[in-house]
Amino acid sequence: MNNLTLALDAMGGDFGPLVTVPASLQALHHFPALKITLFGDQYAIKKHIPQDFKYLNRLEIIHCSQIVTMNDRPLTAVRNRRDSSMRKAIDMVQRGDAGACVSAGNTGVLMAMSKLILKTLPGIDRPALITTLPTLANKPVYMLDLGANVSCDSDTLLQFAVMGSVVAQTVEKKRRPKIALLNVGEEAIKGNDVVKQTAELLKQESSLNYVGFIEGHQIFQGNVDVIVCDGFVGNISLKTTEGIANLIIEQLNIASRSSYFMRLLAFICKPLLKKVFCMVKPDQYNGASLLGLRGIVIKSHGNADQQAFFTAIKQAVIEVEQQVPNRIQASLESILLEKIC
């Protein structure tokens, strides 16, 4: 049995203990072998724990005097937030006392602290944020990077492809996950030099099932299992999708206040479009994994509600059970061995 103790940053995100604590209690109900350590203001945390909660023996609270805010700069926070709930949660993973850390706090600080404390796996230059997106094929697609690295070279993108493939293999049980590069066109002549060079590297890697370029409008079709891009492109793609969904709902709200015909049309279309909106809303697939570290770190959306934060905890449990970092390292070593031979 793997270490099913999770270290949770209870103070991170827009709502802090109001969301993180109830989600933790929900997780303890759901996973009988799970233990959770909550880091943060013990008084704020205890307000949200019923005195008669039946799984108190699997819950620990460690008081922290500091909090990482959304305005903290990564380097400043690394130096000056040593007693923060985020730092203490990562420290627990580094010591081997917890299998994973979950935080809804400042993404830049979380990445900087995680990389400094946990270090990257051999053969990995930079960690990458990965999450699942819904598709028309009713199966998830993994996309990385989603904002941890705004600029990447071809070797780094190759590492992202390896990591994404391993996650799809272990979590989705895909034997040969289809990997695609996000590009401005499907033709070989399209794209910048980095994307073209990455495509050549992926073609040469027999252990990976590279299928070519994919365009933005194909992200949600479900024809591939892993989509690789740098963090600049990935983050904009994700935020644009959410923005379009919000635009459609807001336009329907405006239409519902105009003419009778528009109100009728809005009444008919609104349920369907709300369903689409909920499908692409980030809370529905919350829990981006910071891959490439010598430990598991899960980043929750800052505005996650209880159910969304529970989903992030569930993602952490899956990765601990599947020993994702060890599998990534084994895959990288296999590729290196093939090159040597």
Image (cartoon, grey):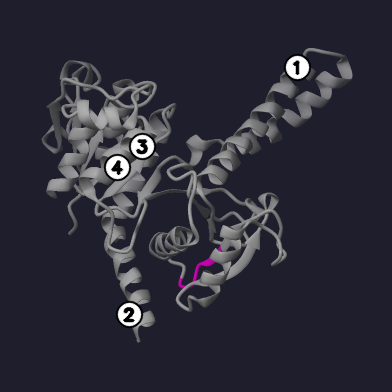
| Mark 4 lies on residue | 30
CA distance separating discs 3 and 2? 39 Å
SS at mark 3 in the image: helix
| Mark 3 lies on residue | 310
Please indicate, yes or no, whether residue 34 appears anywhere in the rendered image.
no
Image location of residue 38, percent across then percent down: 20, 31
Q: Residue at x 62, y 67 (%)?
A: 212
Q: Which amino acid does label 3 sit on?
A: Phe
Q: Is label 2 or label 4 in front? A: 2
| Side of 140 where 120 appears, left or right | left
What kind of secondary structure does the magenta stretch mostly adopt? Answer: loop
Residue 210 part of the magenta segment? no
Image location of residue 276, percent across then percent down: 65, 38
Please indicate, yes or no, whether residue 203 appears anywhere in the rendered image.
yes
Q: Name the mark on residue 337.
A: 2
Quarter of the image where the N terminus is located: bottom left
Quarter of the image where the C terminus is located: bottom left
